[in-house]
Amino acid sequence: MVMGPTHAMSGAAVGLVVAELLPLDWGGPTSTAETLTFAGVCAGAALLPDLDTGQSTVSRSFGPLSKALAKGVDAVSVAFYRITKGRKDGKRRGGHRTLTHTALFAAGLGVGVSTLVVQFGKPAIIITLFFCLGLAIRGLAGELAKEKGWLAVSGVSLALSALTWQWYPTDAGSTGLGVAVALGCATHCLGDAITKEGVPFLAPLIPLGGKRWWEQRLPSFLSIRAGGNAEKIVIGPLLTLLTIWLTVNAFDGAPEAVYAVFDSSKH
């Protein structure tokens, strides 16, 4: 599978771009705080689909709780696959890269989050942020947060969520957080689609040749090996630089200030 840092960075970058384009009627951010929150949720949600297996890094994000959740998601995913599979789809023992790696899941989860935010307001926003930030932090930390790292991840995520509680606008509607979650899940699937394994993003809605769980992937000469040199040396660093640049641009006046500093150093 694509590495956690790559998924998290791609989610953050996509979130920062879409936050600037999302209409206000769709819950688009109205402040820098909301923009960064949107991007943080998107980054975490870009790791969420891999909670369908206990072998993933993010399944250890919250220790025993997330491990138990991963087992449950795995069981539901393989059951959903068996119920919906076509006559030419093979048998599966595990649910990895099935239900949580589909457009149906991304859209459904996004609608669910938006509904909760509308119903419960700020508490739902903070809970969503806590969970997604934890996933993003765990993904970015990689091997730095090993078996006991979930304690640190949970603590940092809780602290950031508490801080957000203080500076997040009280009247924030932020139904757009549902869009962020759906977008993050879709970004994850896009990242998996460029690997040699592919991803069944359109399943089980669009059958093909007797299969409902056929993988969408790039031609073999364009696809990459997950965790290979292309990801580590090219894609990862480029996504990191892009995310930093987009984050700076999210602050009003920041790009001009940075330009002014570099311009003054020339004189």
Image: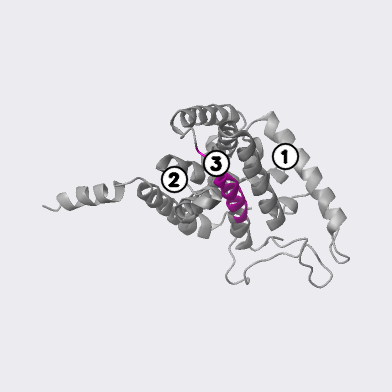
Left or right of 82, for residue 70? left
Left or right of 90, for residue 115? left
SS majority, magenta = helix
What colour scheme has been applied to the protein in the rendered image?
one colour
- Of callouts 2 and 1, the N-terminal one: 2
Magenta residue check for 154: no
Residue drawn at the location 46% of the way across and 34% of the way down:
168
Q: Give residue 56's position: percent from left, percent from top.
A: 66, 43
Circle 3 residue: 136
What segment is highlighted magenta in the picture? Answer: 172-186
Left or right of 75, for residue 37? left
- Of callouts 3 and 2, the N-terminal one: 2
The span from disc 1 to disc 3 (Cα, nearest Å) is: 16 Å
Residue 13 or 250: which is nearer the viewer? 250
Circle 2 residue: 30
Q: Give residue 110's position: percent from left, percent from top.
A: 64, 48
